[in-house]
Amino acid sequence: MTGLHHRALGADVPRPGLGRFRSARSLGLGSHTSSKPARVSARPDAADGAAPATAEPRTVSKQGLQLIMDSEGFSQHLYDDPAGHCTIGFGHLVHKGPCNGMDPSELPYALGISRQQGENLLRQDAQRFVQLVNRTVLVPLTQAQFDALVDFAYNVGFKAFRSSTLLKKLNAGDYAAVPAQLRRFVKAGGVELPGLVTRRAREAEMFASGLQAVPGGTGAGRR
């Protein structure tokens, strides 16, 4: 696939996707694959200047992927996202700037894609943010917490996630601060967007569902 991965170009402004939030679809917030916190390690060879979060790196669960899909919405054809970038499927970034029918990266998608192709692109794109969370979060996480952070990172981008107060507080052991920090990221272009408010609320709920499973997760400082 020749299209660029979603947010691989370093976009740091939250994107609300298409704004389709399917209230009837269950996100499985109470049925994550594991509530056991991952173990902390400190391998010195991590990218981005941080040690990986776990000796056994996590991957995003089905519930986590569903959260991204519900938040982004699906488009079979190329469209310009709210930030003005050419996009397809579940928020897959084809190239920066609007679709124009001339950029070579648009060619593979000229006739549209199936939902299954969109899900395959999402899985590929999500892996970059799975790696980001594994490398930059230095404290144990439950699966629910990990999934919430992957969705958040997928939406706000690499730079915004790495430099966020949320990450600093979490790595200091202040788990309880994370839901409120998530809810701060609800603007794009200085305008509060209902889609981002809904997305952050879902991420906050998912993260909070794992607080009691993490030692010290009620907010006691820990490393």
Image (tube, grey):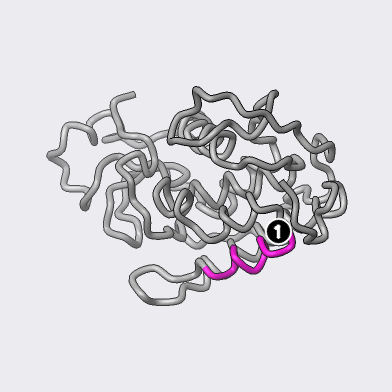
**Bounds of the magenta span?**
175-184
Q: Residue 191's spot in the image, x, y percent? A: 39, 77
With 14 as the anchor, is 136 left or right in this view? right
Is any part of residue 116 visible from this angle?
A: no
* x 43%, y 42%: residue: 89
Occupied quadrant, residue 200? bottom right
Residue 101 pos. (x, y %): 16, 42
Kind of element beneath mark 1: loop
Dominant secondary-structure state across the stretch colored magenta:
helix
Q: Look at mark 1 in the image and give the residue it sits on.
A: 174
Residue 164 appears at what percent x and percent y?
49, 57
Numbered disc total: 1
In-image side of 80 versus 52 (left or right): left
Location of the N terminus (image quadrant): top left
In magenta segment, residue 223: no
Residue 48 percent location from the top left of the image: 43, 35
